[in-house]
């Protein structure tokens, strides 16, 4: 539609990043991408620092995959520019692709190959010499904990095993930049934890990683920065600590957790229910959760002590990534 496709460049949104100054690895400048009548990415500008682990968040149809494919040089922007490692991605795709690895959200049809054959095939396609290829495959299999499945068929494992094989394939040519689209999709809790640990290890080895996921708790644990998209637009971008601090400063109410002895749970809850300015009372195990209207909850602690309730734990629960996401988005999809 006309309003989706401007005749001139719109001003790029102001983006605040809380990262210290570091060499920029990826520059996305006023990028647009359209498919038929759908505008998937609208005027997105974004920078990714070398060594950053960036989480890309948004509902289905937000434009995450389209943006990631443009960064991976698998799609060209209709307007704007993507620069990878200082190179224009439209003009130097070959040299750039040798230094990045892309993992799609879908498995596709897994070939009738062993894991070693599969990794060797992709290493050869990326131009890795035979002797070097063998050494890299051994290192990658150890990193993703697949040494004992080296001679197994790639399609024979569980979803978690297949995801780790895809990560290994993405690493076969030792890329500097990893672009991973939903690597934890469909995994059970143990497999999710294993993938999360692999990504943390890769980042500690100096890899720059862009990863998309709907599992905000996982991203909050492993990422230092996030970018939130909705309806093709980048609605906010920054460090998780910076974004949650901003949310805390704009919110008058505070969330708290109090730990008490098991026998004191009910008396403590009954007491808190009578106090003014206490809301959203709930329980999580031996913890009582509640909100106060302002930032001072000393009156709650004082009331419990005066009632001779033994308090084992008393702390504020700060905003989480999911709170930032809910505040910044409207639930709209393209």
Image (cartoon, rainbow, N blue to C red):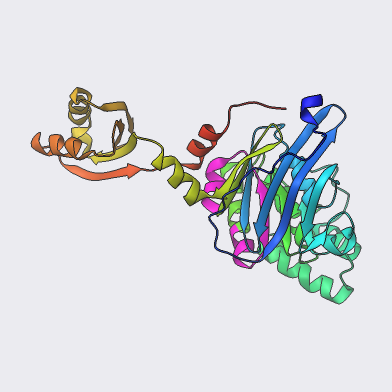
Quick one: quadrant of the N terminus? top right
| Relative image position of residue 322 (x, y in whole percent) | 51, 37
In this view, 315 is above or below 93: above
Tell me if 74 is positioned left or right of 298 in this view.
right
- Residue 327 drawn at (x, y percent): 51, 33
Q: Is residue 219 magenta?
A: yes
Residue at x 54%, y 36% (from the top left corner): 325
Relative to 213, say whether 100 is above or below: below
The part of the image, by quadrant, that contains residue 252 is: top left
- Whether residue 23 is visible to the viewer of this picture, yes or no, is yes
In the image, 17 versus 133, the foreground residue is 17
Q: Where residue 100 sits: x, y (%)?
A: 78, 60
| Residue 212 found in image quarter | top right
Which one is in front, 281 or 81?
81
Q: Position of residue 116 (x, y in %)?
A: 82, 62
Quadrant in which the C terminus is drawn: top right
Evaluate whether residue 104 shows in this view.
Answer: no
Q: Is residue 110 magenta?
A: no
Residue depicted at 75% across the width and 61% down the height: 171
Residue, far bottom: 131
**Residue 204 in the image: above or below residue 304:** below
Left or right side of 255 for 184 = right
Q: How many marks?
A: 0
Point 19% across, 31% down: residue: 268
Q: As rendered, which of 188 and 274 lies closer to the eye?
A: 274
Stretch in magenta: 200-222
Query: In the shown orientation, is residue 308 left or right of residue 167?
Result: left
């Amino acid at each position: 539609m006309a309003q989706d496709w401007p005749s001139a460049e719109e001003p790029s949104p102001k983006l605040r990043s809380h990262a210290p100054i570091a060499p920029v690895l990826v520059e996305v400048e006023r990028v647009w991408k359209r498919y038929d009548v759908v505008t998937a990415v609208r005027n997105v500008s974004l920078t990714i620092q070398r060594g950053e682990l960036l989480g890309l968040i948004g509902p289905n149809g937000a434009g995450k995959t389209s943006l990631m494919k443009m960064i991976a040089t698998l799609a060209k922007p209709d307007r704007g520019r993507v620069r990878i490692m200082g190179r224009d991605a439209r003009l130097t795709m070959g040299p750039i692709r040798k230094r990045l690895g892309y993992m799609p959200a879908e498995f596709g049809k897994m070939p009738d190959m062993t894991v070693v054959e599969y990794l060797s095939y992709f290493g050869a396609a990326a131009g890795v010499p035979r002797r070097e290829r063998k050494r890299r495959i051994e290192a990658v299999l150890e990193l993703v904990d697949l040494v004992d499945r080296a001679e197994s068929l790639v399609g024979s494992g569980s979803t978690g095993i297949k995801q780790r094989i895809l990560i290994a394939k993405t690493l076969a040519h030792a890329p500097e930049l990893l672009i991973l689209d939903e690597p934890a999709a469909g995994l059970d809790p143990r497999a999710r934890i294993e993938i999360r640990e692999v990504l943390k290890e890769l980042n500690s080895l100096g890899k720059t990683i862009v990863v998309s996921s709907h599992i905000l708790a996982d991203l909050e644990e492993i990422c230092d920065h996030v970018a939130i998209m909705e309806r093709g637009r980048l609605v906010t971008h920054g460090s998780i600590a910076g974004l949650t601090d901003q949310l805390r400063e704009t919110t008058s109410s505070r969330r708290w957790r109090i730990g008490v002895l098991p026998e004191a749970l009910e008396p403590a809850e009954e007491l808190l229910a009578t106090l003014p300015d206490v809301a959203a009372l709930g329980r999580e195990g031996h913890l009582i959760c509640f909100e106060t209207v302002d930032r001072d909850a000393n009156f709650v602690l004082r009331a419990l002590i005066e009632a001779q309730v033994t308090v084992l734990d008393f702390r504020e629960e700060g905003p989480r990534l999911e709170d930032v996401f809910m505040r910044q988005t409207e639930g709209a999809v393209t």
